[in-house]
Amino acid sequence: MMPDLGAYTTEIVSAYLASLSLLGVLICWIWLRARRVKRALAQVETRLKRKTHG
Amino acid sequence: MASLWEYANPVKFMKVSGFLLPLTAVLATASIGIGLVWGFFFTPDDFRQGSTVKIIFLHVPSAFLAINAWAMMLVTSLIWLIRRHHVSALAAKAAGPIGATMTLIALMTGAIWGQPMWGTWWVWDPRLTSFLILFLFYIGYIALWSAIEDPDTAADLTSVLCLVGSVFAVLSRYAAIFWNQGLHQGASLSVAPGERMDWAYKGPLYLCMTGFVLLFLALVLAGTRTEIRARRMQALTARERAQERGAG
Amino acid sequence: MSALLIRDLRLAFRAGGGFGLGLGFFLILAVLVPLGVGPDQSTLGLIAPGILWVGALLACLLSLDRLFALDFEDGSLDLLATSPIPMEGVVAIKALAHWLTTCLPLALAAPLLGVLLNLPITAYAALLLSLLIGTPALSMIGAFGAALTVGLKRGGLLLSLLVLPLYVPTLVFGAQSVTRAAQGLDITTPLALLAGITAGSLALLPFAAAFALRINLR
């Protein structure tokens, strides 16, 4: 399964893990923020609609 | 044919990006996934660098994007300053944190690779130094965006900062070369003759580059959509408050 | 325009104007570094050019946030904006006043502090010359940063975050010319590059700073 990386196993694996986790944090941050803003905007829009129609 | 500027309309942009976002996201995941697995499991060791050569499949694409994200911010800032398209300014804002993360990844993978190869995590080599300085520029840019409340003022000021910063980032690059001739090898993917990379590495590397570019696109699209929504929300609540004040 | 310059200089020299603050900071830095690094003369001589340049740069940064802030708060900046002097000229005058009150004293005091840091004897002329040539760029870049952050309540920290990366080329060429002089090498190349950066900043940055100021006054 694991390829033979010789003496550098720790370095390579940690480089991959660190990069992927940084990317993961970035993606999660963008995604969560997108969801939060989308929900908040929907709330504001429905409230405004109710106000103008009711 | 429709002009390119039509996509600068927020409504149209939301429509088109809503279609493009899942597409780029899926393509990015696929090519990064395949590229990294190929690079990690199925590439031979380099005769000089040994197995550490596998780190370049992360290092080179992220470094490439770290610079090009700034270039994209420069172009979108110019478009905002000249043609006043809000989508453009918001795209620049969305690209900031992504570029900063790419710079950080490039620095980190470089440090981890440098440890066994050069015997040290960090050397004050011109390339490394300019990347660190680029990271500082990203931090300043993001900080200025978050410090100013009024969105149009923020867009204007960050655009000017981006223009001036670009000039000084290039100057810093040459200053760093003047300051210390480096250890770092030349560009890995250059057309110039000399040290050429083997096709065994080029395959996964090109795939990872494509994947990272697509990922960058997807993230910028997602970020810009969020910024457009946030902007709309801000405008709506401001109008609501004005109406309440008018009624009461 | 000269009236504006005289006014700014008078304000700076008045009590509470902050004149001499940068100078004091510079002196303290030159005392603290040997205390931190240790008293070894050869080490100090080696790092003296860099310390003096970094110190000058930080001291220059200290007074930047007041460059436009006071005039912005009491509304005189609005008056200046409607006056016949172009905004670019106002920025240039303000930067000149900052240079005269902060950077010029720093440049003149630097050789004295060089004695404290055991700066090699060959480097004194280069230190003075490089600071005289390079610090106008520091003032001008700082004025641009101050123009960007003038409308903010806590702009001081942000200002240094924005300005310090922009100082990198000036610092490198300035400190390099002193280091090279200390090693007995030719310093025309770094000095010429330093002068180039100063000339370029003085020519272009007033426009960027004036643009930022107009936006902040909107």
Image (tube, rainbow, N blue to C red):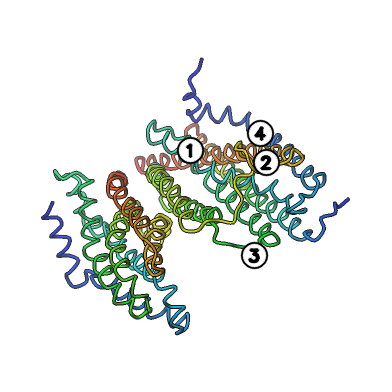
> Label 3: which residue?
B120
Marks 2 and 4 on same chain: yes
Q: Which dot marks residue B232? A: 1
Q: Which of marks 1 and 2 is in front?
A: 2
> Label 2: which residue?
B196
Marks 1 and 4 on same chain: yes
Query: In the image, what residue type sits under mark 3?
Result: Thr
Mark before the other along the chain sequence, 3 or 2:
3
Measuring from the top left, give residue B221's x and y in whole percent: 58, 36
Query: Could you tell me which residue is drawn at 18 percent across and 49 percent down?
Result: C80
Q: Which dot marks residue B24? A: 4
Tag 1 near tag 2, CB within 8 Å: no
Report the chain holding disc 3. B
Q: Nearer the viewer, residue B84 or A15?
A: A15
Mark before the other along the chain sequence, 4 or 3:
4
Which quadrant holds residue B182? bottom right
Report the chain holding disc 1. B
Q: Is residue C150 visible?
A: no
